[in-house]
Image (cartoon, helix red, strand yellow):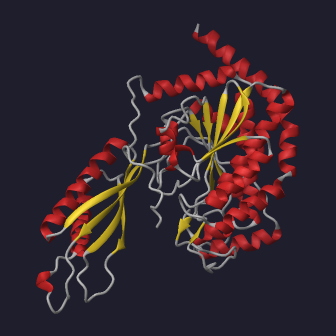
Amino acid sequence: MRKSYLLTLVLSIFFSTIKGQDSSAPILKQLESKSEQYGNIAQEIWNLAEMGYQEEKSSALLQKTLSDAGFKITKGVAGIPTAFIAEYGSGTPIIAIMGEYDALPGLSQEAVSEKKSAGKASGHACGHHLFGTASAAAAIASKDWLATNKEQGTIRFYGTPAEEGGSGKVFMVREGLFNDVDIALHWHPSSQNTASAGAALANKSAKFRFYGVSAHAAGSPEKGRSALDGVEAMNTMVNMMREHIPQEARIHYVITDGGKAPNVVPDFAEVYYYARHNTRDVVIDIFDRMVKAAEGAALGTGTTMDYEMIGGTHELLPNLTLQKLMHDNLSKIGGIEYSAEEKIFADKIAQSLGQEKADLAMAKNVQPYRTEARAYGSTDVGDVSFTVPTVGMGAATWVPGTPAHSWQAVAAGGTSIGNKGMMVAAKTLTLTAIELFGNNTLVSEAKKEFQEKRGADFKYIPLLGDRAPALDYRN
C-alpha cells in the first residue's frame, strides 16, 4: 500500500509540475515585466523606513498595490492598525504569502558603498521593504494564474508588521487568522540564494522598569534610591547567570533609560531584554530566572520593579515536503548577475567587511539543499509554522558576505542589487504557489508531515501571553 501511495504521489507531482510549468511561463514573464514597478514600490518603502507598528505609509502602499490588482483588503486585523489581509479567489486550497515591512532603529544609511547616514531614525537593515514587496508581487502573480486558468483556490497576502521584536504575526496567529490556511509561504533577504530547511530561535523579550527615589546625588544621596542601581544590579546577576544556561542560549540587553543627569539620583530606569534558545521551554525557564534576578535587584537596591512583555516567538517547525519543492523552484529561477556598476559597488562593500573582493558566485548560484539547519536568529514566522505547514527561502539581495542588521545591508537594499534579488524571491514564491494550487496530493502530504512533527498533543500557547500588541514599543 505504501509503495502504491508513493507512486501515486510521485506521478501526481510530476504531472502537476508539467502542467504548472506550461501555465506558469506567461505568468513569470508578466511578473518580470513589472520588475521596475515593484522596484519602485520597494524603494519607496526603503525611503520611508518606518519602524514596527509605525508602518502606516508602507502598509497603505502595499494595500493599494494589492487592491488595485483585485484583492479584497481587510485592514487593522488582530488589533494592529498596520496589519492587514488581502484576499483573492474562493475555495481551497488556501495559500498564504507573508510580507513584512518594518525597519530597524539606529541604522540610517544612504544607498552608497561607504558608511553615510541618511539622517533618519531608522533603516531597512533586514530588507523588509523587499520582503513585503516581493511577497505582494508573488500574491498578485498567483492571482493572475488563478484567473487566467480558471482554477479554484484562494490566495492571501498577510501584511505582518513589527517582525523586529514586536511579534506581529503572533497576535495574528493568536487571533486565529491562519486557522483555515492550508500552506503558508515566506522568504527573507539574504547574502545568498538558499531554500534549505530553516531554523529559528524561540524568543521572549521584555522591558524591566525600576522605580526609585530622586535626590541630589551629592547634597543628600542618603535620601535617594537609584533606579539605575536596580538596572545595573539586574544586569550583573543576569551576566553571571550566563555561565549556568545552555551554551546555545542567547541573552541580549540595552539600557533604554538610565537617568538624565549625573547629579540627580534616577528615580526611573529601564532595561530591554531578549532571551533566546532553539526550544521554547528553555527560553521560558531562562526568562523566569531573569525575572527573579530583577526582583532580587529591586530588593537589594531599595527600589521597586515591574516588567512589560514585548514579544515572544516559537522556534521554527520545518516542513521538508514543502522545502524540497521550494528549493527546486528556486533552482529553476536561479540567482542574479551583477552589472559592471554593481560589481564596483559590491567590491567596495566587501572591502568594508574586510574582504578583498565580493564573491559574486554566491549571488549567481543556488546553495545546495540541506535538510537541517542551525538557528542564529528569531522570527515570528515560528508561531505560524506551528499553526499551518510553512516554508521559506532566502534570496541574495545583499552583497555576498554582508551580515543582516548592518549599514552594508541597508545600502545594498536601496540599490538595483536589492531589487534583482527581490524578483528572484517573487518568482520562486509564485512558482511554488502555482504548484500547490494544482496539486492537492502534495498539500495533503505537507499537512501529514506537519501533524506528525507538531505532535498529536500540541496546544498552541503564545509566549507573550494575553497581552495586547505593544504598539508603542519603539517609542
The x, y position of residue 269, in whole percent, is 29, 72
Q: Nearer the viewer, residue 270 or 384?
A: 270
Decide: is 77 above or below 100: above
Tell me the residue at 18%/65% (across/down): 297
Tell me the residue at 51%/37% (across/down): 385
Q: Nearer the viewer, residue 53 or 124?
A: 53
The residue lying furthest to the left in this view is 222
The residue lying furthest to the top in this view is 1
Q: Nearer the viewer, residue 365 or 317?
A: 317
Tell me the residue at 82%/57% (across/down): 37
Tell me the residue at 40%/50% (across/down): 203
The x, y position of residue 461, in whole percent, is 38, 37
Numbered disc total: 0
Whether residue 335 is visible here, answered yes or no, is: no
Q: Quadrant of the N terminus?
A: top right
The x, y position of residue 388, in whole percent, is 54, 32
Q: In the shown orientation, is residue 188 left or right of residue 436?
A: left
Q: In the shown orientation, is residue 203 left or right of residue 21?
A: left
The x, y position of residue 328, in whole percent, is 70, 37
Whether residue 119 is visible here, answered yes or no, is: yes
Q: In the shown orientation, is residue 88 left or right of residue 205?
A: right
Quadrant of the rendered image containing residue 86: top right
Decide: is 202 above or below 189: above
The residue lying furthest to the bottom in this view is 219
Decide: is 286 above or below 10: below
Q: In the shown orientation, is residue 28 left or right of residue 432?
A: right
